[in-house]
Image (cartoon, helix red, strand yellow):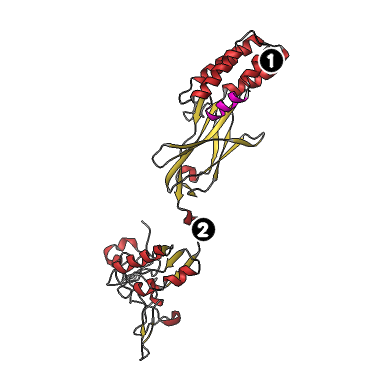
Amino acid sequence: MGHVSENLLPRIPIIEVFPVVEDGTLPAKATEEEPFPIRATVFREGHDAFAAEAVLLTPGGGEHSRTRMVDVAPGLDRYEAWVAADAPGAWSFRVDSWSDPYATWAHDAGIKVPAGIDVPLMLEEGARVLDRAAAVPGRDSGDAAALTAAAEQLRNEALTDGERLSAGLAGPVVDALDRLPLRDHVSPSATYPLQVDRSRALAGSWYEIFPRSLGSGSDEQGNWYTGTLRTAAERLDRIAAMGFDVLYLTPVSPIGTTNRKGRNNTLVAQPGDPGSPYGIGSADGGHDAINPELGGVEDFIALVARARELGMEVALDLALQCSPDHPWVTEHPEWFTILADGSILFVGSVRCV
């Protein structure tokens, strides 16, 4: 006897789920209140009806919504539903499929009863389906009453066969089962991660600044002086007034002196040249420090607070580039590519480990 795989498909198979990144190793992404489609190929053997729902799960794992999927590629069993998360966080989703006994009965009875085939059996089968549907946990009392009444009419031999069938196919019955279906053989897919970000992550108007340039100038002797985080904060009104909603900062960490670049990107710095903010790291600290020429942590916090007052977010360029003076060079030499002369491979050499 041949080998039987333990990885069997569910009763109502669900394959080719979208959006899924690297088989769910990485999350798909969306922003709050942004509608996006969940798609899957769903099928079954035989002729019985089936259905599928996209189930959106909150960061806590609870059900946020169930949305009925529709066939968007007839003949290919490709189903789709549009959903939206209402807050940022680590959400997830799955697809549930199930056998639909009411839709199966409605299809078969709609053919057989008018043709006079198995009429008593079909009417009783319909009544039993509605009895089961009325008893589904969570059913609205009004809907349950409508389903029970329809089941009674299906069994009422004082009515014509057509009247009894019509009671089982009536609008209130269909609406009640749309709101809360009767599901057999429920088959859930795997659960896939979904990262939901704030709306600004989708699109924004960014304004880039070098903080040292806002408030900089020359004194009477022609000596250049730098702007600071405080002087930059004082000039944010103008940026906000132009309609920008994200303030983009170049790195604000200390700048190394070894191999510091000069004006106009020259390779030799003159006394007083500030260097490139991307040559990060000096005796004053590394990526987790503030360039003392710009101010301190309190000044950075004040800049962010002022930007928020003006309705702007702050984005900071986190450049994984290190000057040879960076503290990490001596503290964590294993993070760097060491050359034959003992120096490190310059800018951009830090390894992500």
Identify the mark nearer the N-term, 2 or 1. 1
- Closer to us: 330 or 238: 238
- Residue 83 x, y percent position in the rendering: 53, 42
The answer to whether residue 44 is seen in the rendering is no
Question: Mark 2, mark 1: which one is toward the viewer?
Answer: 1
Q: Is residue 131 located in the magenta-colored stretch of the structure?
A: no
Whether residue 127 is visible: yes
Q: Choose between 258 and 173: the one closer to the eye.
A: 173
Question: SS at mark 1?
Answer: helix
- The stretch of residues the image draws in magenta is 171-180
Amino acid of disc 2: Ala
Q: Main secondary structure of the magenta part?
A: helix
Question: Within 10 angstroms of label 2, few (less than 14), some, or many (20 or more) residues?
Answer: few
* Secondary structure of residue under mark 2: loop
**The label number, if any, that marks residue 203 in the structure image:** 2
The image shows residue 304 at horizontal and vertical percentages of: 37, 64
In this view, which residue lies farthest toward the right?
115
Amino acid type assigned to the residue bearing label 1 in the image: Gly
Quarter holding the C terminus is bottom left
At 67% from the left edge and 33% from the top edge, which residue is drawn? 75
Q: Looking at the image, which is closer to me, 147 or 201?
A: 147
Residue 103 in which image quadrant:
top right
Q: Which mark is residue 162?
A: 1
